[in-house]
């Protein structure tokens, strides 16, 4: 049996949705990829989450939960600090990894660039390829 290791890059939208919908995003992604995964966020995604957390409200509360309880326990942080969408897309492409997003525009850009996208299927209540 071959066991591979895949880099899986998460964007802000996917992390927020996982919290608001109470989804075990890491488990969903592991099942979809069928490999060992290295979950990664970029510095730019962490910055986006931090700015949302500072603003407060529902999204801010979700962002705080992601920053305090999820990122430190499950994610490696890549030192890319440009525009978050550009960073996650280029990292997924460079590593031959996957991109996890709920942003349809980013999903299209990724697919146009040959990056495999894992996205949320509301009907299934889970993330799938």
Image (cartoon, rainbow, N blue to C red):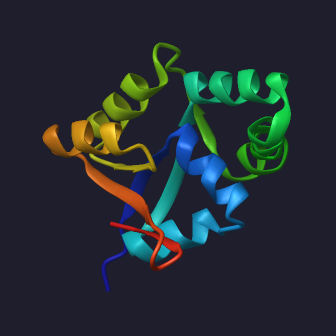
Tell me residue 57's x, y (percent).
83, 35
Residue at the location (20% across, 46% down)?
Answer: 111
Q: Position of residue 23 (x, y in %)?
A: 65, 68
Using the rendered view, name the quadrant where residue 121 is placed. Answer: bottom left
Residue 118 rendering spot, x and y as whole percentages = 38, 59
Q: Quadrant of the C terminus?
A: bottom left
| Residue closer to the observer: 26 or 51 | 51
Q: Nearer the viewer, residue 8 or 127?
A: 127
Q: Judge from the rendering whether residue 88 lies leftward or rightward of residue 95; answer left or right.
A: right
Q: Nearer the viewer, residue 24 or 73?
A: 24
Q: Quadrant of the N terminus?
A: bottom left
Q: Is residue 87 above or below residue 105?
A: above
| Residue found 46% across the figure and 17% down from its top | 83
Report whether 125 appears left or right of 104. Answer: right
Q: Is residue 66 above or below residue 17?
A: above
Q: Position of residue 39 (x, y in %)?
A: 54, 51
Label tally:
0
Drawn side of residue 29 relative to residue 68, left or right: left
Please identify the residue farthest to the top as the structure is shown. Answer: 82
Q: Decide: is 55 above or below 114.
A: above
Q: Is residue 61 left or right of residue 103?
A: right
Q: Quadrant of residue 22?
A: bottom right
Q: Looking at the image, which residue is at 61% across and 54% down?
A: 17
Quarter holding residue 48? top right
The residue depicted at 77 percent of the width and 45 percent of the height is: 62
């Amino acid at each position: 049996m071959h066991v591979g290791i895949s880099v899986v890059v998460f964007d802000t939208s996917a992390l927020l949705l996982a919290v608001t919908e109470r989804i075990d995003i890491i488990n969903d992604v592991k099942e979809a990829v069928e490999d060992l995964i290295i979950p990664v966020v970029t510095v730019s995604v962490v910055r986006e989450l931090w700015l949302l957390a500072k603003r407060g409200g529902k999204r801010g509360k979700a962002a705080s939960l992601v920053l305090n309880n999820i990122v430190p326990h499950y994610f490696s942080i890549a030192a890319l600090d440009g525009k978050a969408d550009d960073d996650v897309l280029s990292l997924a492409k460079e590593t031959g990894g996957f991109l996890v997003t709920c942003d349809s525009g980013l999903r299209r850009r990724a697919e146009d660039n040959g990056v495999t996208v894992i996205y949320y299927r509301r009907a299934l209540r889970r993330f799938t390829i």
